[in-house]
Image (tube, grey):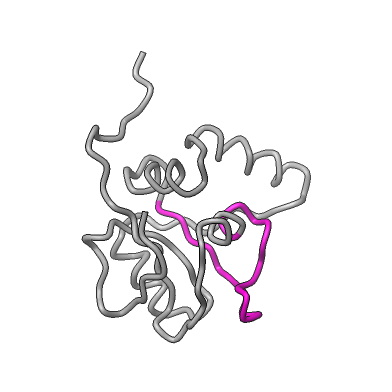
């Protein structure tokens, strides 16, 4: 039975925000934002969490390293919240390039990409 489509060698994941966002985030705060438990940064700015598309290797790494859950567990978590009306899943984009472009154009955006994909248009607040 195939349990994971991720490569055996894991890549470093960079959590990114808009360059003007001066927030400092730890792993627990990032987890709360991506699980819908917190809707804003400590500065009060509304947070717009953004995921890579389901099945992306970097997304699986993020879910494992930061959320401490498998993709199936994250999907089940969000299915329950959406079904009960207690949450809205984060926005999803198809590629690191689309994610970086979205974050660069939205002050409240927070997302993650492969660390090797980071450009000068965004600010890295954590790596895992």
| 66 displayed left or right of 73 | left
Out of 86 and 33, give the one closest to the viewer. Answer: 33
Out of 103 and 25, give the one closest to the viewer. Answer: 25
Find residue 84 and report its image quarter. top right
| 106 displayed left or right of 79 | left
Q: Is residue 12 above or below residue 83?
A: below
Residue 66, given in percent of the width and then of the height, sits at 47, 49
Residue 101, given in percent of the width and then of the height, sits at 34, 73
Residue 29, given in percent of the width and then of the height, sits at 58, 61
Find residue 18 and report its image quarter. bottom left
Residue 122, given in percent of the width and then of the height, sits at 34, 76
* Residue at 29% from the left image edge and 52% from the top image edge: 12
**Magenta: main secondary structure:** loop
* Residue at 44% from the left image edge and 41% from the top image edge: 64
**Residue found at the very far bottom of the displayed protein:** 20
The magenta span reads 33-52
């Amino acid at each position: 039975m195939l349990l994971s489509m991720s490569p055996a060698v894991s890549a470093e994941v960079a959590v990114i925000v808009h360059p003007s966002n001066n927030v400092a985030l730890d792993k627990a705060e990032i987890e709360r934002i991506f699980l819908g438990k917190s809707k804003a940064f400590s500065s009060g700015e509304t947070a717009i969490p953004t995921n890579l598309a389901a099945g992306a290797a970097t997304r699986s790494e993020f879910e494992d390293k930061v959320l401490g859950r498998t993709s199936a567990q994250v999907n089940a978590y969000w299915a329950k919240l959406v079904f009960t009306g207690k949450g809205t899943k984060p926005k999803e984009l198809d590629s690191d390039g689309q994610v970086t472009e979205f974050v660069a154009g939205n002050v409240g955006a927070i997302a993650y990409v492969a660390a090797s994909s980071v450009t000068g248009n965004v600010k890295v607040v954590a790596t895992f």
